[in-house]
């Protein structure tokens, strides 16, 4: 509870990239990661969680991808969603509705990421 935002971000960046559903739930509960308003922390968390198929964060990922158009946050999240079949389906669904609001560079970068998804 006493960690500064930069400490939380470093912690998330240094976690193993493969986590169990239980580990994700424990981290989220302890640090209230899904409820964060800091997009640096939130994006780092969502990327880790969705890459591990932790579906309780899918709604928050959708919210971020439809409300925030900065490539800095959008591209890594689409990359992380591409790691699992449910994530890929969600990414395609979100992109279909969010793409018109993206800047053209963000839209093209996102399309490029999704073009690399397995079929």
Image (cartoon, rainbow, N blue to C red):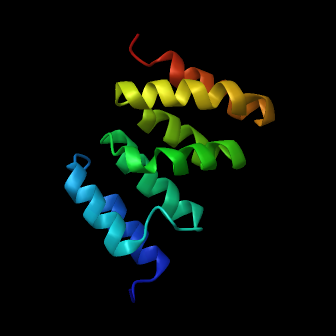
Q: Residue furthest bottom?
A: 2
The residue depicted at 46 percent of the width and 18 percent of the height is 116
Picture quadrant where residue 23 is located = bottom left
The residue depicted at 69 percent of the width and 34 percent of the height is 106
Is residue 95 depicted above or below 74 in this figure? above
Is residue 39 depicted above or below 29 in this figure? above
The residue depicted at 35 percent of the width and 31 percent of the height is 83
Kindly tell me whether residue 10 is visible in this rendering: yes
Q: Position of residue 77 (x, y in %)?
A: 50, 41
Is residue 69 depicted above or below 6 in this figure? above
Q: How many marks?
A: 0
Viewed as shown, does residue 91 lie left or right of 83?
Answer: right
Kindly tell me whether residue 82 is visible in this rendering: no
For the N terminus, give its image quadrant: bottom left
Q: Position of residue 22 (x, y in %)?
A: 21, 56
The residue depicted at 52 percent of the width and 25 percent of the height is 113
């Amino acid at each position: 509870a006493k960690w500064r935002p930069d400490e939380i971000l470093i912690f998330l960046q240094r976690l193993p990239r493969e986590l169990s559903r239980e580990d994700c739930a424990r981290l989220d509960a302890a640090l209230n990661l899904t409820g964060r308003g800091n997009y640096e922390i939130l994006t780092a968390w969502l990327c880790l969680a969705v890459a591990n198929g932790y579906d309780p964060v899918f709604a928050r990922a959708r919210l971020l991808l439809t409300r925030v158009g900065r490539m800095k946050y959008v591209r890594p999240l689409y990359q992380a969603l591409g790691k699992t079949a449910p994530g890929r389906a969600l990414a395609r669904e979100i992109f279909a509705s969010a793409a018109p609001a993206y800047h053209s560079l963000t839209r093209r970068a996102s399309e490029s990421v999704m073009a690399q998804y397995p079929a």
